[in-house]
Amino acid sequence: MRKHALQIFRAALQAADPGHAIARYFTFDGKILAAGRKRYRISQFDRIQVIGAGKASAAMARAVERILGRRVSGGFINVKDASTHLRRIIQHESGHPVPDQRGLEGARRIAEIAREAGERDLLICVISGGASALMPLPSAGISLDAIQDTTRQLLACGATIHELNTVRKHVEDLKGGQLAQLAAPATVIALILSDVVGDDLDVIGSGPTVADTSTSADAAAMFTKYGIVPLPLHETPKQLTRVQNLIVGSNRQAIDAAAQHARELGYRTLVLSTFIEGETRDVASVHAAIAKEILASSRPVRPPACILSGGETTVTVRGPGLGGRNQEFVLAASIALERSGPATIFSAGTDGSDGPTDAAGAIADETTVPRARALGLDPRQFLEANDSYHFFEKLNALIKTGPTGTNVMDIRVLLIP
């Protein structure tokens, strides 16, 4: 069953592959560039450049190079890991999840390219999860240190990605539609790989090419809510022209592929939701309760059963340990399912990283907690210390994929034999 959980996860990753995702929506026949339902005659552009940021932006840029070939004259993207080979587009490694000086330098170069673009320029902007942190450009009067400190505080407080990005848009100069505004009068096509619940365009990567629906008052409310010293705020553009925003991949597509593979393996499969948010331990408790119901009464689906969910939870950090939301989910669910019966629990980030760790997530079954106790480990102590990484490390149960080249939030799998 552990093998099956990993196979189901790999099916989700394959569906979220940026190259495949872009190829479905972005094509070129030598004269006409098709982006979704829109068509562009390539002869109307003197120059095509690629800009953007995100954990999957290098793979996305490579897909654009393959489709347009020599039509791409250049470009610049901020990435977390510059391991992808690109011919014409420069990759610039930057910090994540806390922005750093490298990201700032790259963001300045991206802003310069946008600012210099003219009416006969086409800018293809590749945006994926992580773009907010990887492309920082603080507004006048705000230091990078202040952005870093605010980011750390919001992450530690358990702020949602919607809340965090609401603040970012109003204290920086490329987010909340400001990159597209800077590029005017050039034509902008943004290819977007969604890593946010609900696929809200103005939240993904803090919406650098999307007219912003949030206000500076909304950002101010976040400082008040979490008791953080406020930074100076500014308003963002509410209307943009000559911009197309196109979602090419999402958590929903990944979950659909996972569900299909689970059925092929013989499981009766139920997708709970791709909109899962909230405190990780609470989400784990609900998933465990569903598994218990299946074990006790074969409801809502009869075994062999596969329960899937997607989305992105948050962890309120209270202890000094090391971990991430996926590892904490598996630990909390394992504790809740102790002595309930056979079940395999899996959760991992599709980008290959979970919090500030080198693991994508973790996997457990009904033997995990008893094995830990036999080794003298108290699972609840590790949970209270937010130390799920070291718990699963001792049990050889961490999932380590390395960078996957994509990022469409998390995949959770519960298997009941």
Image (cartoon, rainbow, N blue to C red):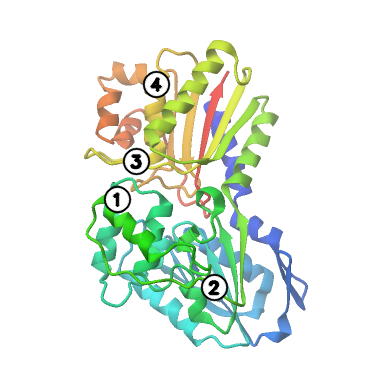
Q: Which residue is mark 3?
A: 315
Numbered disc 3: secondary structure: loop
Around disc 2, counting alpha carbons within 10 Å, would you say few (fewer than 14), some (14 to 19), or many (20 or more)?
few
- Classify mark 1: helix, strand or loop: helix
The amino acid beneath tag 4 is Ala
Q: Which image quadrant is residue 109 in?
A: bottom left
Please give left or right for residue 123 compared with residue 30 in the image.
left
Q: Is residue 281 above or below residue 13?
A: above
N-term-proximal mark, 1 vs 3: 1
What separation in Å lies between label 4 and label 3 (alpha carbons)? 17 Å
Residue ID at (56%, 57%)? 193
Locate residue 3 relative to residue 148 in the image: left or right. Answer: right
**Marked residue nearer the N-terminal end (2 or 4):** 2
User: Which of pointers 2 and 3 lies earlier in the amino acid sequence?
Assistant: 2
Q: Quick check: 55 above or below 374? A: below
Real-space Cα distance between discs 2 and 4? 48 Å
User: How far across and how far down the image is residue 273, in percent?
Assistant: 56, 37
- Counting from the top left corner in percent of width and height, residue 156 is at 28, 47
Q: CA distance from mark 4 to mark 1?
A: 31 Å
Give SS at disc 4. Answer: helix
Task: Look at discs 4 and 1 and give the one toward the viewer.
Answer: 1
Give the x, y percent position of residue 211.
52, 68
Is 43 drawn above or below residue 270 in the view shown?
below
Q: Which residue in the structure is indicated by mark 2?
A: 239
Look at label 3 and name its amino acid: Val
Question: Going 38% across and 42% down the picture, which residue do you hit?
Answer: 314
The residue at which mark 4 appears reads as: 336
Residue occupying the point 36% across, 72% down: 234
Q: Amino acid at mark 2?
A: Gln
**CA separation in Å, label 2 and label 1:** 28 Å
Q: Are marks 1 and 3 in contact (CB under 8 Å)?
A: no
